[in-house]
Structure formats: C-alpha cells, structure tokens
Image (tube, rainbow, N blue to C red):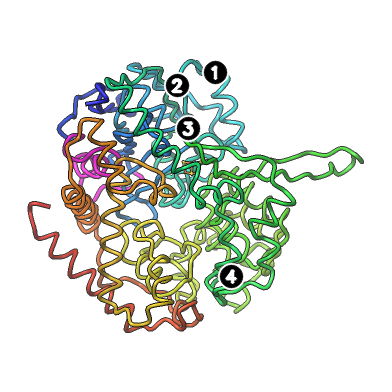
Amino acid sequence: MLNSDPLRYVLYIDLSKKNFHIANRSDLFSAYLGGAGVASRLLMEECPEGADPLGPDNPIIMAVGPLTSLYPLASKTVAMFKSPHTGNLGESHAGGRSAVSIRMAGYGAIVIKGASERPCYLSVQGHKVFFRDASTLWGMGKSATVGKIIRANEPSSGLRTIMRIGRAGEKMIPYSCVTTETYRHFGRLGLGAVFGSKKLKALVVSGKRSIPVTDQKQYREAYEAIFRNATESPVMKKYHEIGTPINVVPLNEMGGLPTRNLQAGTFEDAGRISGEAIAQNYLGKRIACAHCPVACIHIAAIREPYEDEPYFYKTSMIGYDYELIYAVGSMLGGSDVPGMMKLIDSIEAYGLDCMSTGVVLAWATEAFQRGLITEGQTEGVRFAWGDYAAYQEALALLVEQPNEFYAAIARGSDFAAGKYGGQEFSIAFGGNEMPGYHTGPAAHIGYLAGARHCHLDGGGYGIDKKMMVNKSMTPEMVASELLAEERWRQILSSLVVCFFARELYKPDMILNALRLSGFDHTEESLRALGEIIHTTKFRFKVREGFSFDPLKIPRRIYETKSPVGMIDEAFVKKALQTIQQDISEKLTNDAL
Ligand code: SF4
C-alpha cells in the first residue's frame, strides 16, 4: 500500500447542541471509496424519512475521496443533503481548496446536523471545532466581503477553505448556492438554503496534516502519468486556454445552444459571447482548484468608470464559464458582455445558482411577453430579452421578495408557472432548471432520469453527438448508455475527480491509483460498485417521494429543433420507461 493514512474519520457536528464527535468509519470508506459513495450512505443514515429539507434534521454531508490530495485533478468535494428545490436528493460538487482542506484536517467526511438559534459559522481546525458567532455577518450585502472578514479572523496555517452563503441562502431561496474560494460553487439544488435554515453562514476547514506515502517511486510514477496526460491532453489545453465557454460556438453552429427560453437552438449573437471573444477582450486571469495543473477557471476583468469621477475606474474580477454564459447570455437573449458579466457578479454576490436564476428569468421574460404577468406584478420591471438593467432590478426583487410574484419566482420556474401559467415553457426537469445543452433527446432524457436532474449525471449530450452520426439508435440504446455512464460516474464522484478529467481517469489508471492507496479492485468490481451507489441514490429519491410517473416534461423541448432534428415525444417516453424499469428492478434487489 502506498498511502499509509487511508480515509476513515467522519466528523459529526451538531449545531443545536453545539457539540461534535469524531468516528472511525473505515467500514464506509472501505466499501464505498469516499465522495458520492460514502455521502449517499451517510445521507441514508442521517436524514430521517420525510425530513423537512429546511428543518434541523436535514444533514449537510461533505465527503472527499481516496485520491484527494494525492493525485492531480482529484480536487472536488461532494456535498449531499435533501434538496429544498426538488424535495429529494441534493448533490452538488465543488473544488477550490475544499477537498484538500477537509483531507488535511484529517477527515474523509463531515456531517452537520441540527440548527443554530443565532447566526454562526463553523471553524474546523484539525480535530478542534469552534462555533463562532456570525450575527454581524448575517445580512451583509456581498458574500465576498463575508469571505474577506472570515479570512482576516481565522488562522491561516495549513490549507484552508471557506464555504459561505449570501443573502439568498439566508432567505432560504431553494436554488441558492454555497460559494467556496470566491469562484467555485456548490451550485445546484439549494445547499445554500440548507446552510441558511441552520443559520450557518459559513464553514471554514483548515488542516496541516500530510499524507505519508510508503513507496515514493511507485507514487511518483503514477502521479506523473496522470500529470503528463493532464498537461499534454488537447482537451485540457482547450480548457486552459479558453475554458468551457469554448463550447458556445460549436453548440450554436449545431443548433444546440438554448436561446430565449429555448425558443431557438441558435443565437444570432453567439460570436459576441463566445469563449474566444470574451478571452480576447476581457480575460483578466486564470486560476485553478488545488492540485490541478489545468487551471480552467476564467476570470473576466470588467472596467467601469465611476459616475462622477472622470478617468477613475473600478475593475471587477468576475468568474465565468459555459453554463453561466448560456444561462444569462443566450437563454436571456443577451450579448452585451459587460452587462452579462455584471449580472453574473450580482447573482454571485447574492449567492444564487446562476443556471437556475437564468432559466427563471427566461421564464419570466416569456411569461411577461405573453401577458401572463403584468407590470403591476413585476413592480414596474419590463422584462425584455437582453435587457440587463431590467434583469438587475428583477434579481434584487427576487431576493427581497416584496410581493407574491417575486416570492413565486424565488421558488423556481415550475412553482411560478404553477401559479401564473406557462408550464409548457418552464424549462425545468424534476424541478431543477435546465442546463445549457439542447443537443437532442438523450440530453433531455438524462436531465429527467438522472439522480441530480443535471447534465453531469449521464452526459446525454455525448450520446446525442453519436446520434448525429448513428441515426438508428433506439430509445433502449439511449437508456442503456445513459445508465451505464451515470453508474460509472459514481466511481469518479467517489474518488472524487473533476469530471473534466474523466477521459484521463480511465479504468486502468484508476485501478493503479487505487491499488497504491490500499484498495483492491477490478474494473468489474468498480462497475458493480457504481451500480450500488446509483441505486442507493434512487432509494433515497424514491423514499422521499420521487417518481417517474408524474415526471413533467416541458413541451418546449419538442417544439424547438435540436441538432438531431425535432425531438420525438414517443422516443423520450420509451427511453424513460426503459430507465424506470431498470431502476425499479435494481430497487427490489436488497443486495444493491
Ligand atoms: S479542470 Fe478546472 S474545475 Fe477541474 S479541477 Fe481543474 S481548475 Fe478545477
């Protein structure tokens, strides 16, 4: 074994009682690796059936993996909780320094339960936990300021991560996020609201342990093989140079870039919001998660003059990626890059999930245009495609919720459509607003049937790409590919490696790295484990009320041409039925 310090400890924190304990859970880590595997078991253990997602019983679980701190791009933390947005599985991944700090503090996972009476933040320093008062931080306008204050007040030796919420999380908006290291997010499914419900403003974790390796030579060889692949791979080079927004142009050319609430799959101004154009005109710097040589995170420098001070400028540094550009660019019909970036910055300051926010604003724009909502309800905001001044106004009102309309859109596009009409163009799947790929049926089937209702579940856009060539793919084939991919990704999420590195972490590379970390696996045993983890997630979802039967499919997906043509309703339904049957069978198998 290379790593003589395997993951085994879970830190349990109770915010109600203000106490904590540490347990040796090598039983969990030896069976489920770490990350999503361990977190899904802890969720089943710690979340009582029917728990209120915004009540003290809902646990926040953060888990890292056996490769964390040892190998390049094993940089993510998995957060699991019951989602206040969908009412079932909440799972979100973020990088920054979160994973490395948790491991350096000595933990494989952290479980936070209960709720504090007063605003607080937690500071985990190795085996000590401090419950700090956060009354003065609560209600602060900019979540970045909160980060600065905590940074100044917490010891900085070793590796430290600061995960924090903004006003949206405090107000328990069900699609609010948790920000870590300013530019990374546990974005989807409402972890920010769960923090807010516990009056937990932030979680700081620091540690300065090291991980002893017993065979330097083998470790170096394994490390260098992955590092070399990461730095020499053309895909990673592309992510470093332009970042994920490199996808804007090709998606637009093929007709898969959701535009104006998916009324179209192409955007006439895509060139202006392309990764290439933004890099050329606004790129300020690139940064990386800890232990990542790729540095795909792109930060725009947006310079604005002060109103009454000629020749004086303020420069805002704003993180961007493909999903954000889609959600508040093409989806809102906007191509004014400074306006778009400033909207991203405000969403960031409030601590909202940018994808859900963009899709909610897109629904509101179409609903306004169709007369389903009026200026009386919008407090005078005239929603119009690409009008960033109007979107800024609406965003502030969405967070403050001065009336029923803003309270409704603060609960998501499906909720608002249930109240005002327009369900057919509320582009949400399982309650979660759409990611940025209208590439064909597989993408949408993936959003509907994936455990997180997210493009990262089964990567359906990759299957759509195959369908562009292979026109004879059947619904059963699509269902089987989506399930196989989602089950394999459970292994990547348990290790926990960045999904951008999924082509680098091939089975043989993973098996070698795991062997050196003390895990004896075969490709078959890993695939079997992926199936177990996937089934555990669905066991939780079904227990909490998820069902394929009333799954709402937005009609808009059938009305807008995709790169593989018009999407056939019967095809989507057949594939969903096949997936449902497969998962139902697995759920009846007690061994899974
Ligand atoms: S590729 Fe990007 S998101 Fe992934 S670990 Fe590296 S910097 Fe973080």
Q: Dots 2 and 1: beta carbons under 8 Å?
A: yes
Give the residue number, with chain letter if any, for mark 1.
153
Q: Earlier in the sequence, mark 2 or mark 1?
A: 2
Give the residue number, with chain letter if any, for mark 2.
132
Residue type at mark 3 is Ala
Q: Earlier in the sequence, mark 3 or mark 2?
A: 2
Q: Position of residue 410 (x, y in %)?
A: 51, 56
Residue positioned most to the right: 310
Q: Earlier in the sequence, mark 4 or mark 1?
A: 1
Give the residue number, with chain letter if any, for mark 4.
252
| Res 251 visible | yes
Q: Nearer the viewer, mark 2 or mark 1?
A: 1
In magenta segment, residue 18: no
Q: Nearer the viewer, residue 192 or 467?
A: 467
Q: Dots 3 and 2: beta carbons under 8 Å?
A: no
Q: Dots 4 and 1: beta carbons under 8 Å?
A: no
Quarter of the image where the N terminus is located: top left
Q: Residue at x 46, y 32 (%)?
A: 291
Numbered badge on residue 290:
3
Residue type at mark 1 is Asn
Disc 2 secondary structure class: strand
